């Protein structure tokens, strides 16, 4: 089935303008710079994946009950607000043993990356990553806010963009 956008949602004209400008600015050089920038910060991204995966596992059966429903957006705030706990010593061994093929929701992941002071990025930079991964990262489908991505998929997508030929 084809995805059909909701016509009930209001979109501010300024957001449409910002989005179009972002897409227009994403030439091959800009895409490679974004991909390389996030690849250079991979250690922090791995921490964020571990934190979001932990938060999602704590949600347990509640998350399974809400699958495919609007409340998936509510998961973003607790995950983003808990950004400091990735450094409190619990991430060490668990981080080494975690499954890089476990999907995490992209929206909480991006919000956590923006809020993590070690990353030093803003929402525009995170949006550029999202656009780069979705449009030029290969087999990554991030068109829905509740979409998921694995650590392995993100790593592969970043490498695909970095290795791509200039167009």
Image (cartoon, rainbow, N blue to C red):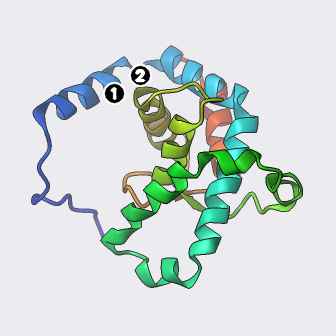
Q: Measured from the top left, where is residue 18 in percent x and y? A: 25, 26
SS state under label 2: loop
| Side (left or right) of 98 relative to 154 | right
Q: Is residue 32 above or below residue 71?
A: above
Q: Write down the quadrant of residue 157 in the picture.
A: top right
**Quarter where residue 12 is shown:** top left
- What residue is disc 2 on? 26
Quick one: 135 or 43, which is closer to the camera? Answer: 43
Element type at mark 1: helix
Which residue is at a point 55% across and 84% down the rendered structure image? 61
Q: Indicate whether 130 appears above or below 97.
A: above
Q: Do the residues bearing badges 2 and 1 touch, measured as CB atoms within 8 Å?
A: yes
Query: Can you identify the residue that label 1 sits on?
Result: 23
Would you place residue 149 above or below residue 17 in this image?
A: below
Q: Residue at x 71, y 55 (%)?
A: 50
Q: Residue at x 86, y 52 (%)?
A: 92
- Residue 23 rendering spot, x and y as whole percentages: 33, 27
- Corner quadrant of residue 123: top left
| Mark drawn on residue 103 | none
Left or right placement of residue 93 versus residue 147 in this view: right
| Mark 2: few/some/many CA within 10 Å (<14, 14-19, 20+) | some
């Amino acid at each position: 089935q084809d995805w059909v956008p909701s016509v009930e949602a209001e979109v501010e004209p300024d957001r449409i303008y910002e989005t179009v400008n972002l897409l227009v600015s994403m030439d091959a050089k800009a895409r490679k710079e974004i991909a390389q920038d996030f690849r250079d910060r991979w250690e922090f991204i791995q921490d964020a994946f571990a934190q979001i995966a932990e938060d999602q596992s704590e949600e347990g059966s509640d998350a399974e009950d809400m699958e495919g429903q609007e409340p998936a957006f509510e998961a973003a705030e607790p995950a983003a607000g808990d950004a400091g706990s990735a450094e409190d010593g619990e991430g060490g061994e668990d981080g080494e043993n975690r499954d890089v093929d476990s999907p995490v929701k992209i929206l909480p992941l991006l919000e956590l990356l923006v809020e993590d002071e070690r990353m030093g990025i803003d929402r525009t930079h995170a949006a550029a990553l999202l656009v780069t991964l979705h449009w030029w990262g290969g087999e990554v489908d991030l068109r829905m806010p509740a979409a998921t991505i694995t650590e392995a998929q993100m790593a592969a997508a970043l490498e695909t963009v970095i290795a791509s030929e200039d167009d």
